[in-house]
Amino acid sequence: MTSRWCLLSTLLLCAPALARAEDAAALWDKSCKNCHGPDGRAQTRMGQKESIPDMSRAAWQKAESDTELRDVIANGSPHNPKMKAYKDRLTPEQLDALVRYIRTFKAKE
């Protein structure tokens, strides 16, 4: 009986994190994937046209802080005017979830 409660407690504690991860993936698919690709590698027509960096590269992941990523998502890119600002469309929690999602992209270096 005790092991069931432990399992149930663990599942209940993990459920919000899993839901946030799914929400971030859905947000990525809706708002980011067209330019940045499903895996952040920017192997899309717009990604190639705009020379969008490959977010899965270890060097890129290391060079960009979470604060910088959140700022670009919220306010748009100072390097690419086509990168829209999402501060009026996304909640602070959604912005943070997207930053965490970007950090899941696998480094190839």
Image (cartoon, grey):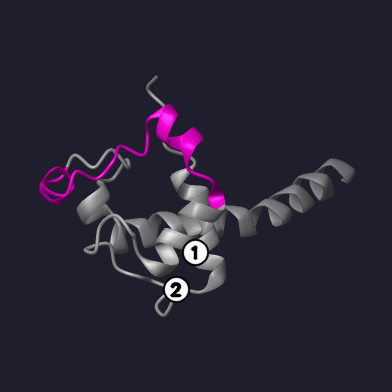
* Residue type highlighted by circle 2: Leu
Q: Residue 52 colored magenta?
A: yes
On screen, residue 83 above or below 109: below
Residue holding disc 1: 95
Question: Callout 2: few (<14), some (14-19), or many (20+) C-alpha neighbours within 10 Å?
Answer: some
Residue at image position (34%, 59%) is 77
Place of residue 37 in the rendered image (x, y in percent of width and height, measured from the top left): 25, 46
Residue 80: assigned label: none
Place of residue 68 in the rendered image (x, y in percent of width and height, measured from the top left): 49, 53
Place of residue 54 in the rendered image (x, y in percent of width and height, measured from the top left): 30, 37
Residue at image position (38%, 62%) is 27
Answer yes or no: do the residues labelled 1 and 2 have beta carbons within 8 Å? Answer: yes
Residue at image position (28%, 45%) is 38
Please tell me which residue lies in front, 98 or 17: 98
Residues shaded magenta: 44-66
Task: Farthest residue to the top: give it.
Answer: 109
Residue holding disc 2: 90
* Residue type highlighted by circle 1: Leu
Going by the image, does 41 lie left or right of 27?
Answer: left
Q: Quadrant of residue 53?
A: top left
On screen, residue 64 above or below 84: above
Residue 106 seen in render: no
The tally of labels here is 2
